[in-house]
Amino acid sequence: MSSVRAVISVIGEDRVGIIAGISDVLAKSNVNILDITQTAIEGLFTMIMVVDISKSNIDFDALKSRLSQKGQELAVRVDAQREEVFHFMHRI
């Protein structure tokens, strides 16, 4: 089965548990993290993840909903897009 990837971004005030909370949602959904970068600068937190959703046990809309709900709990903004949509939206 080929890889189906998504891009997840997280932005908000830095606090304990953001990476753990988002990673927990992904693990429970059987989504594999392929790449991750995160930065905290002067109290602001940003994270971008590339994930493999090909073996997810829920559909993409449900995953987006769970990530958004977890983001609300953590007081951060979470956006998820399929990789092909992300690339199409950011073409020059």
Image: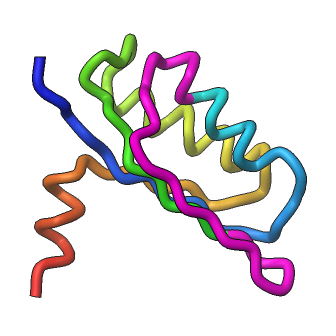
Residue 70, image x, y percentages:
68, 39
User: Which range is magenta?
Assistant: 26-45
Q: Is residue 60 above or below residue 35?
A: above
- The percent coordinates of residue 22 (x first, y second) are 64, 40
Residue displayed at 70% across by 46% down: 19
- Quadrant including the N terminus: top left
| 92 sits left or right of 21 in the view | left
Residue 20 falls in image quadrant? top right
For residue 91, which quarter of the picture? Answer: bottom left
User: Residue 72: percent from the left, percent from the top?
Assistant: 71, 49
The location of residue 23, given as percent across then percent down, is 62, 35
The one of 9 and 73 positioned closer to us in this rendering:
9
Residue 24, placed above or below residue 77: above
What residue is drawn where x is 72% and y is 70%?
45
Look at the image and say whether residue 44 sits in the magenta stretch.
yes
Residue nearest the viewer, comparing 16 with 74: 16
26 in relation to 39, above or below: above
Taking the spot 38% from the left edge, 40% from the top edge, the residue there is 51
The residue at the point 25 percent across, 23 percent down is 54
- Is 19 left or right of 56, judged from the image as shown? right
Q: Residue furthest top?
A: 57
Q: Which colour style is shown?
A: rainbow
In the image, is residue 23 above or below residue 59?
A: below
